Image: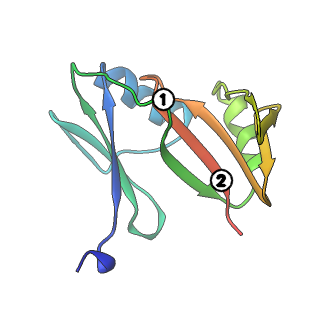
Amino acid sequence: MLSQARVHASLPAADLARARAFYEEKLGLSPSEVNPWAVVYELEGGTRFSVFPTPNMARAGHTQMGFAVADVRAAVAELKERGVVFEEYDLPGLKTINGVAQAEGRTAAWFKDSEDNVIELIERE
């Protein structure tokens, strides 16, 4: 049953208006649905995610959502032009250079949204 289901992410926001502005202005996304309990964004292939208001902003400190893109470096450059700041890591097995990491044949980058959620860009194969 679940193997046939589509999955979506739900990201918490302390300030829903601020989060909506980030996703629309910085990432260039348009909401498909706006209501008092969430802003929903629908993307290619029926994927979607929502941002919901909550006073409980506990964080796990890891990637909470990822975008699969054809070219991470191009996406990073475009998003940097829009004011998105990318994380820099220097850990065993993971080092970014100008916000981009290459490890085990994968190219990826991470940034935080306005609510401190960690978002990944990963290159499609």
The answer to whether the residues at label 2 and label 1 have Cβ atoms under 8 Å apart is no
> Where residue 71 sits: x, y (%)?
75, 56
Residue 19 in the image: above or below residue 37 = above
The image quadrant where one finds the N terminus is bottom left
Of 68 and 34, the residue lying toward us: 68
Q: Residues within 10 Å of mark 1 (few under 14, many from 20)?
A: few
Residue flagged by tag 1: what amino acid is it? Gly
Of 56 and 85, the residue lying toward us: 56
Of 27 and 109, the residue lying toward us: 109
Measured in 3D between alpha carbons, the distance from the residue under mark 2 to the one under mark 1, in whole angstroms, is 18 Å
Residue flagged by tag 2: what amino acid is it? Ile
Helix, strand or loop at label 2? It is strand
Identified at 67% across, 64% down, the residue is 124
Of 102 and 116, the residue lying toward us: 102
Q: Identify the disc placed on residue 122.
A: 2
> Where residue 101 sits: x, y (%)?
78, 43
The residue labelled by disc 1 is 61
Residue 100 in the image: above or below residue 14 = below
Identified at 46% across, 35% down, the residue is 23
> Where residue 42 sits: x, y (%)?
38, 56
